[in-house]
Image: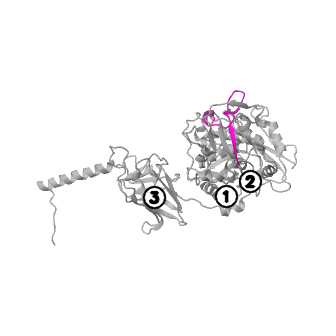
């Protein structure tokens, strides 16, 4: 057998050749590191080619490990940045043909993925790729393939649905080409199990608001019929268009509030509409404010299309009349204030009048002419949305009719489809493992959660929650337990013309950063003090009131239980806090209970007090 030995100590000629090859390799590496790097002086690759993802991450379907084919990512641009939820970071590899492998701790049915382009160097964008699934890393099934995809913007998110119903433990993304750069960079990568249909749940739905008379929904049907017979006069339309024409203060607030001039910063959160701009103060229109937050969450550009800044401290809002025809309402920069001059209209953080203040006042002024909701206090979700979208078709799921999986699916699918979802709680309860309490007779904006162990999230239009600071902007993650989900009801409304400005939302809401106590969240005691609900029942009434003590950190919340013996009223028996306590309005509570209507011998399912 012939054996060839390589000389351990090369000759001078060989040493010279090695030196030349070494210099050439260094030169090539230097050129490669300069391409698509964070700076001209790129740091040599130090990032590992694996990254562990927590089961609480919303980026991947389960907990598991990401692995890239090559361990050449520069420091700070590794796999961790690929799933950190920040479009300003990125994953970099100095290859145009490579794979990224996802190994889940358990199998999952992945039917959706998304890639987001980085903040620079479009030539380094991925251009062609395929996605495969496997349960043994040997036999791979093609799930999706894309060729010649072009990211037209920086930090652009491309989303893809997969027709897949099989669970896989391993998902491999094979990048086969980029856009010509010396490296490939991706800002974000997401694999998800998205539920795409709720048709099987519609047997449990109620509260259909379809109307054959008007696209605005059944709430506007009578007004539409009247409008057909008696059209609004030109003088009324001129009044709506005149900013100097101030509407009456809503009757509920007339004794305490008046119109006052405020400076307006239309989009105070980085120049764009944001849910954090919707903060309720002194008007009982939480459903409308929850709607505004939903607009900003799903269709921020839609809001910008609604409002025209006239450049003179007035704003024209595009709306619809009861027949679903366009109408324009112009408002001044005067908003409702209390006797101290503090804004009581909805506002942005720190009491800044903004786009939400404008939309709320437009509703008040609209109703001064069309008189559908003559007092904005108590306006419903399905009443507020069509004023801006032209579509009042909606349905609801009452509390307790869906199990946890179904409830989460109703929210997730509806948001993905671009529908507005607003919900409430009844009764109020403390979230397990926290001190945070839900509020009953109150509307919340439903959102995706960033915690995969939770069902979904709900944002309180107060901009904070009881027993919690305002740094989370009122967002509550709904646990997958037997306590909170059965207390939730949902109203789901079609998007109407808002759908022109997007196709739905799949990402969780990430509130802007607020230091605790700096966002100026506040709600008047009249609105926060008592949240009333009545459970299902035929013969008797049990009224449970959560006493929320605004401004009193030394006074804990209490639950008052009242029992009304007769269907048509009666003498309540109760265990109650001190009637002299300034935070307990016993007379109001008794009055509310006594005014609860009987259900005419039928179960009182779905009958509850209007969200305030």
Q: Which residue is mark 1?
A: 403
Q: Distance from label 2 to label 1 (Cα)?
A: 28 Å
Is residue 347 rendered magenta in the image? yes
Farthest residue in the top direction?
A: 340
User: Residue drawn 40% across and 46% down?
Assistant: 76
Question: Which of the two residues, 73 or 255, is positioned nearer the viewer here?
Answer: 255
The image position of residue 463, as x and y in percent, is 63, 40
Check residue 149 in the rendering and tell me which mark sits there, or answer none.
3
Along the polypeptide, which appears first: circle 3 or circle 2?
3
Visible in this render: residue 171?
yes
Tell me the magenta residue range. 326-353
- Considering only order in the chain, which callout, 1 or 2, is on the residue closer to the N terminus? 2
Instruction: Write the residue at 48% across / 63% down.
Output: 169
Q: Quadrant of the C terminus?
A: top right
Left or right of residue 599: residue 554: left
The percent position of residue 75, horizontal first and vertical second, equals 37, 46
Disc number lying in front (1 or 3): 3
Q: Is residue 289 above or below residue 68?
A: above
How dense is the environment of label 3, judged by Cα within 10 Å: few (below 14), some, or many (20 and up)? Answer: some
Residue 217 disc label = 2
Q: In 3D space, how far apart are the residues under numbered discs 1 and 3 (Cα atoms)? A: 40 Å
Q: Which sits in the foreground, 150 or 602?
A: 150
Under tag 1, what secondary structure?
loop
Indicate which disc, 1 or 3, sits on the residue closer to the N terminus: 3
Where residue 326 appears, x then y in whole percent? 69, 48
Q: Position of residue 180 (x, y in %)?
A: 37, 55
């Amino acid at each position: 057998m012939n054996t060839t030995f390589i000389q351990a100590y090369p000759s001078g000629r060989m040493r010279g050749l090695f030196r030349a090859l070494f210099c050439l390799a260094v030169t090539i590496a230097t050129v490669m590191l300069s391409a698509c790097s964070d700076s001209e002086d790129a740091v040599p690759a130090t990032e590992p080619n694996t990254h562990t993802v927590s089961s609480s991450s919303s980026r991947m379907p389960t907990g598991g490990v990401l692995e890239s084919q090559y361990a050449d990512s520069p420091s700070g641009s590794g796999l961790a940045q690929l799933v950190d939820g920040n479009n300003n970071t990125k994953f970099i590899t100095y290859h145009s043909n490579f794979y990224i492998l996802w190994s889940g701790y358990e199998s999952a049915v992945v039917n959706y993925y998304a890639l987001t382009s980085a903040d620079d160097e479009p030539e380094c964008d991925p251009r062609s790729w395929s996605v495969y699934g496997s349960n043994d890393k040997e036999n791979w099934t093609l799930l999706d393939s894309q060729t010649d995809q072009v990211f037209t913007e920086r930090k652009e998110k491309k989303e893809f649905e997969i027709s897949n119903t099989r669970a896989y433990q391993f998902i491999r993304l094979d990048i086969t080409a980029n856009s010509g750069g010396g490296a490939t960079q991706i800002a974000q990568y997401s694999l998800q199990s998205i539920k795409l249909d709720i048709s099987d749940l519609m047997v449990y739905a109620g509260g259909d608001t379809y109307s054959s008379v008007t696209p605005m929904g059944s709430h506007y049907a009578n007004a539409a019929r009247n409008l057909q017979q008696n059209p609004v006069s030109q003088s009324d339309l001129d009044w709506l268009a005149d900013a100097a024409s101030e509407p009456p203060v809503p009757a509920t607030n007339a004794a305490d509030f008046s119109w006052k001039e405020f400076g307006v910063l239309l989009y105070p959160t980085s120049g764009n509409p944001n849910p954090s701009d919707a903060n309720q103060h002194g008007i009982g229109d939480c459903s409308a404010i929850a709607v505004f937050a939903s607009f900003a969450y799903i269709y921020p550009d839609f809001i910008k299309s609604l409002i025209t800044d006239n450049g003179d401290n007035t704003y024209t809002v595009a709306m619809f009349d009861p027949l679903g025809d366009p109408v324009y309402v112009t408002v001044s920069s005067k908003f409702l204030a209390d006797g101290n001059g503090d804004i009581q209209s909805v506002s942005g953080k720190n009491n800044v009048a903004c786009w939400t203040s404008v939309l709320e006042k437009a509703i008040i002024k609209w109703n001064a002419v069309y008189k559908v909701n003559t007092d904005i206090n108590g306006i419903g979700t399905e009443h507020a949305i069509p004023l801006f979208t032209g579509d009042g078709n909606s349905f609801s799921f009452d509390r307790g009719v869906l199990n946890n999986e179904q409830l989460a699916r109703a929210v997730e699918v509806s948001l993905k489809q671009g529908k507005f979802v607003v919900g409430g709680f009844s009764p109020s309860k403390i979230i397990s493992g926290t001190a945070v309490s839900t509020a009953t007779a109150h509307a919340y904006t439903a959102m995706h959660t960033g915690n995969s162990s939770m069902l979904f999230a709900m944002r309180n239009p107060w901009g904070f929650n009881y027993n919690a600071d305002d740094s989370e902007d009122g967002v509550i993650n709904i646990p997958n337990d037997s306590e909170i989900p059965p207390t939730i009801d949902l109203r789901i409304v079609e998007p109407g013309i808002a759908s022109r400005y997007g196709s739905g939302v799949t990402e969780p809401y990430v509130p802007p950063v607020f230091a605790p106590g700096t966002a100026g969240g506040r709600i008047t005691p009249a609105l926060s003090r008592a949240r009333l609900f009545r459970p299902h029942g035929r013969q008797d009434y049990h009224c449970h009131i959560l006493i929320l003590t605004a401004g009193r950190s030394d006074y804990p919340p209490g639950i008052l239980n009242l029992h009304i013996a007769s269907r048509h009223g009666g003498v309540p028996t109760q265990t109650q806090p001190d009637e002299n306590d300034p935070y307990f309005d016993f007379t109001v509570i008794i009055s509310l209970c006594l005014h609860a209507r009987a259900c005419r011998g039928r179960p009182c399912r779905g009958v509850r007090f209007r969200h305030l």
